[in-house]
Image: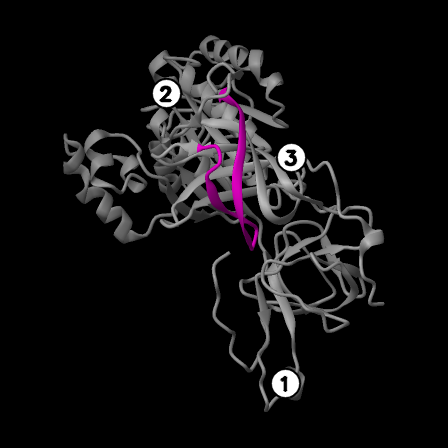
Amino acid sequence: MSAVQPFPVSEVRSPAPATSVDILRFNTCGSVDDGKSTLIGRLLYDSKSLMEDQLEALERSADITGGGQVNLANLTDGLRAEREQGITIDVAYRYFATPRRKFIIADTPGHIQYTRNMVTGASAANLSIVLVDARAGVIEQSRRHTYLTALLRIPHLVVAVNKMDLVGWSEERFNEIRTEFEKFLPRLDIKYVKFIPISALLGDNVVDASEHMPWYPGPTLLRHLETVHIGSDWNLNALRLPVQWVNRPNNPTDPELHDFRGFSGQIAGGIVRTGQKVMVLPGGQVTTVKEIHTYDGPVAEAFCPQSVTLRLEHDLDVSRGNMIVAWDHHLPGASTDLRANVCWMHQRPLQIGKKYWLKHTTHSVQVVVTAIDHRLNISTFEEEPAPAGLALNDIGEICLRTAQPVFFDGYETNRLTGSFILIEQGTHATVAAGMLFPPTEVVRPEQSEFVI
């Protein structure tokens, strides 16, 4: 999380509003020209989520694509090169809402050379939409992006079979594609999968039900997005609060704020309650939660992914990068030796023995790559022999050694405390995104320093 400025001295608030509404984050992916940007444009257009100036800009941009026809893909393809070539290059984010739910969309590229962009855009998603051209069926990029969805542990997958109008709205063709997907889906361990036949260009089964496909009894895409259950996607079993900022308003005119000292951050897992016994890592001090403050005021309990400020019962040495966890059996791993899958995101290849900065939650530590175990072929789902280095867009399993212990969970258990990025020293370029394997050792309570 980025640095934040102090709040007004008149009140104590967390660095961001607490999550009080249901927000679904999803990404679209698939091969080139499968209709990802058009689908998002159709969602925005048919759900009446566009402002008048956006509609006017859409009409003005019609001449760029030729023929004078409005191109819904222009709502997300903002770069000139994207509009001229008719492809998506960078990740585009769009926001819209219905009476049921708010949405954050990441439109990710389909080209193989932009795999890193897809990983970036999908890293925080609750749901992934993989588009398939009904004419082409399941191709390499379909398998690739489905595998990346599984690798990133995105719990919900929608396979949207697009351009059904170009295959005569054929139920048989839809079932053929579904059967081909179902042959390899069990190997990927994706929890929830939904198949929906659509026409993004014409709007069939996107927002409104299609009159051309009465054989499909399921919900439209928007209806599914509005109703898919995401409440259990967050890990609510083990409290994790990476400290982002020490909150000290130091207001001499307000007795309540004069000596206020709280610890702000986004809850990365679990539930925190007043009176709860907690431990501060890496020191191991144990205390209880005195107060919980949110953007909307004090509360008795808060949960992931809310942003909060905690006041503790005792004055402890706590700073940015520390982690507050529950004092129970759900403790994080602690190690200087890490194993992870990484997606390499830089032109200069990853090299064994090179030092980087590892940023994990709010904590940064120097790290060296000690080994590359293997590279993943995400087209065949097979492991390939370890290369000398990982090139741009490669995904592989590596070993790391950090200068200080990292407190973490496996990525399967907690996507927030199980992920990290690597930063190149000197240039400060983000060169990799990583997903940690489960820890082999956890924090040992008997070594902690009790203060209560």
Q: Earlier in the sequence, mark 2 or mark 3?
A: 2
Q: Secondary structure at mark 1?
A: helix
- The amino acid marked with disc number 2 is Lys
Q: Position of residue 272 (x, y in %)?
A: 73, 58
Mark 3 nearby-residue class (10 Å; few <14, some 14–19, many ≥20): some
Residue situated in front as seen by the camera: 42 or 179: 179
Which residue occupies 76% across, 48% down? Answer: 443
The reply to whether residue 175 is visible in this rendering is: yes
- The amino acid marked with disc number 1 is His
- Quarter of the image where the C terminus is located: bottom right
Dominant secondary structure, magenta: strand
- Magenta residue span: 351-376
Question: Is residue 206 one of those drawn in magenta?
Answer: no
Location of residue 293 by image quarter? bottom right
Q: Earlier in the sequence, mark 3 or mark 1?
A: 1
Residue pointed to by mark 2: 163
Residue pointed to by mark 1: 258
- The amino acid marked with disc number 3 is Glu
Q: Could you tell me if the residues under marks 1 and 2 are in contact, i.e. CB atoms within 8 Å? A: no
Q: Could you tell me if the residues under marks 2 and 3 are in contact, i.e. CB atoms within 8 Å? A: no
- Up the image or down, 329 lies above or below 181; here it is below
Q: CA distance from mark 2 to mark 3?
A: 34 Å
Q: Secondary structure at mark 2?
A: loop
Residue pointed to by mark 3: 412
